[in-house]
Amino acid sequence: MSQASGPADAVVSPQSVSTALPQPELTTPTVVVPVKRSNAPPGASKLGRGPRRRSYCFPRAFAWGVATAAAQIEGAAFEDGKGESIWDRFARVRKIDRPTVACDHYHRYRDDVALLGRLGIPNYRLSVAWPRIFPQGDGAPNPKGLEFYDRLIDALLENGVTPWVTLYHWDLPQALEDRGGWRVRATPQAFGRYAQLVVQRLGDRVKNWMSMNEVLRFVPCGYLYGCDAPGAKESAAVVNQIYHHALLAHGYAVEAVRELGGKRSRVGLVHNPPVPVPVTETATDITAARAEYLRETEQLMGPLYGGSYTASFLKRAGADAPKVEPGDLELISQKTDFLGLNVYFGEFVRRGSNGEAERIALPSQYPKADISWLNIVPQAMYWGIRHAREVYGVETVYITENGAPYVDQVLPNGEVHDLGRREYLRNHLISLHRAIHEGFDVRGYFLWSLLDNYEWAEGYAKRFGMVRVDYRTLQRIPKLSADWYAKVIEENCVI
Ligand code: PNW
């Protein structure tokens, strides 16, 4: 099947699927140097104008940016009235690194925003800390919390940086966890009230909203395996109900943006589907990869894009299926403006001898970044975008996170030559370019992350930043990848 044709075999009926993919206008390469016959390499004359010097240029309006999250950079965990979050509690109880100071962005935000401006980063994805706004999760808001985000947004705009705001990036107020957390419907309802207040307060300056970050990570890790906050290990029935509540929270956020965000405001979910990459790009392996993608994502994407839980999910869940109240699925499946995709790695899939999808285990020497789960599979960028379109009819996509941790060395001259990260990013951008070139509607890319930061249960040991943070002095040092990325943005091409 040609990639440019419609999702003929979409499995879940999507919101509205046009048959032809839009063809974005790619900017013409800025440097096209005709090769003179005299010094041309053998055979070059057959290429007409000579070799193109720029192969990977992006659409004119493409939104380049970097991403962070409140709990990972802000610190000031108990200042100016902020309430305790489940991460403050979890880290203390587990005796692991705590987010109490992190990058001290709460006090250094002006410098960090000025750095964004200096590097020429036009878009910045941040999150609002719910416990800063509602220290008890609900009830009376904290004026000082709101004032902080006022100042931050104003500073971004003054520096020519467009803010993109995530409403929930995992820092649930501990007070709500104590009352049942995501297990109870009261939490998505409280989230709805929080979303309304934030959209009302910042909506005059913020037009790009993201509801929830990575439901597929915080639910299983926080409530099934216990590896992330709040560290619970619940039954399948409770976990399925939690997924449903997270979807409801997304729905309330969409409603808040539609009602209070003003005309030009846009909203989407940030999703982290596993990405099955077909071992060969043949119809059989692609079909297998797609089947695997559907199985791994239908619990969320069925309700979001099809307005119902799929029959195959309900069959698998059996008696553990979530309880759904009238109106829930309408709230959840409201049309959004884009889907955010966080892409870090992929898994290889082929059609097995029994005709079913088969995952191929990676050999021990397969390349990895400096964290157990990050196998380097740049093709995941392309396939993550293509599967979303072909399986669920997703039209507009932003890459809301992509990046990798490496052990960085500060050289005697103070520089950090993080070429591992640079190659990772560069190869993923080339794969992203392929998707755009084939006509998929990808409008932007956010590098994870601006700064080295608090990598959740992994603490400060894992560095994802394009800017190094010295956790002793809190000094920031842009790495080679930051300078490189700034030039990519300036040229609008992979360089
Ligand atoms: C995302 N995995 O988390 C989050 O959105 C960020 O807050 C985080 O810092 C970043 O990616 C890097 O980890 C993930 O195990 C955590 O596959 C774990 C996984 C994926 C994403």
Image (cartoon, rainbow, N blue to C red):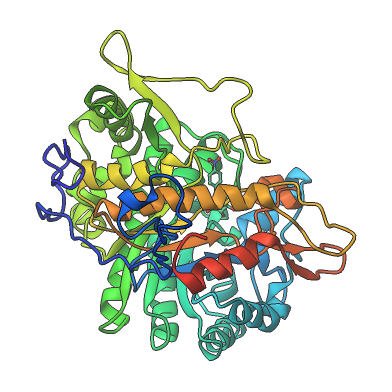
Which is nearer the eye, 51 or 494?
A: 51
Q: Residue at x 26, y 26 (%)?
A: 282
Task: Examine the rendered structure and indicate whether residue 231 appears above or below residue 311.
Answer: below
Residue 57's place in the image compared with 354, above or below, is below
- Could you tell me which quadrant the N terminus lies in? top left
Residue 138 showing in the rendered view: no
Q: Return the residue found at the far right.
A: 412
Where is residue 101, by image quadrant? bottom right
Residue at image location 28% in from the left, 34% down from the top:
294
In this view, which residue lies farthest toward the top?
A: 353
| Residue 201 in the figure: left or right of residue 462 | left
In depth, the one of 311 and 164 nearer the eye is: 164
Does residue 152 appear to the left or right of 46 in the view shown? right
Looking at the picture, how far across and down is residue 465, in whole percent? 66, 59
Indicate left or right for 103 with 242 as reference. Answer: right
State the residue in front, 10 or 84: 10
The reply to whether residue 489 is in sight is yes
x%, y% of residue 397?
Answer: 32, 58
Q: Position of residue 203 (x, y in %)?
A: 39, 83
Count how many numbered circles sit on residues in the image. Answer: 0
Residue 94 vertical placement versus 22 (above, below): above
Q: Position of residue 348 (x, y in %)?
A: 42, 27
